[in-house]
Amino acid sequence: MKQQGQGQGILITDFENLLSNVFSLAFKLILFFLVGLIIWLGIKYIKGEAKEVHSRFLPLIIGILLVFLSLTIPLLIRNIFK
């Protein structure tokens, strides 16, 4: 016989796994997009549009760092308190 509340842990764990997978996929897509932007800016730089590249490159690098940190900091905290 099932005890009261026994099945709730399974639902929470499944939801946590689903949420973790969704965020992981979203971060991978964002990083893929940002790397594509770096390649695009590199091509523009080679073509001689250096002023435009310089104004967009720093925010792009900051965005990549923010995405990376927003993924790693929660994982680090979760592993510390596990």
Image (cartoon, helix red, strand yellow):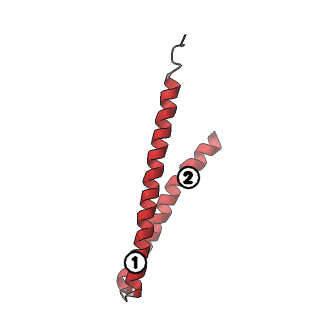
Q: Position of residue 76 (x, y in %)?
A: 60, 49
Residue at the spot of label 2: 73
Residue ID at (40%, 84%): 45
Residue furthest to the top: 1
Image height of 13 relative to 68, above or below: above
- Regarding mark 1 in the picture, which secondary structure is present there? helix
Residue furthest to the bottom: 48
Asked whether residue 51 appears in the rendered view, the answer is yes
**Local crowd at mark 2 within 10 Å, few (<14), some, or many (≥20)?**
few
Q: Which mark is residue 75?
A: none
| Contact check, label 2 and label 1, Cβ < 8 Å | no
Instruction: Measure how far apart labels 2 and 1 are at the Cα level.
Output: 29 Å
Residue ID at (42%, 69%): 36
Image height of 34 relative to 56, above or below: above
Q: Quadrant of residue 46?
A: bottom left
Image height of 33 relative to 72, above or below: below
Q: Position of residue 31 (x, y in %)?
A: 46, 62
- The kind of residue tagged 1 is Leu
Residue ID at (48%, 45%): 21
- The kind of residue tagged 2 is Ile
Front residue of 69/45: it is: 45
**Local crowd at mark 1 within 10 Å, few (<14), some, or many (≥20)?**
many
Q: Quadrant of the N terminus?
A: top right
Earlier-in-chain disc, 2 versus 1: 1
Q: Quadrant of residue 44?
A: bottom left
- Regarding mark 2 in the picture, which secondary structure is present there? helix
Residue at the spot of label 1: 41
Q: Position of residue 5 (x, y in %)?
A: 51, 18
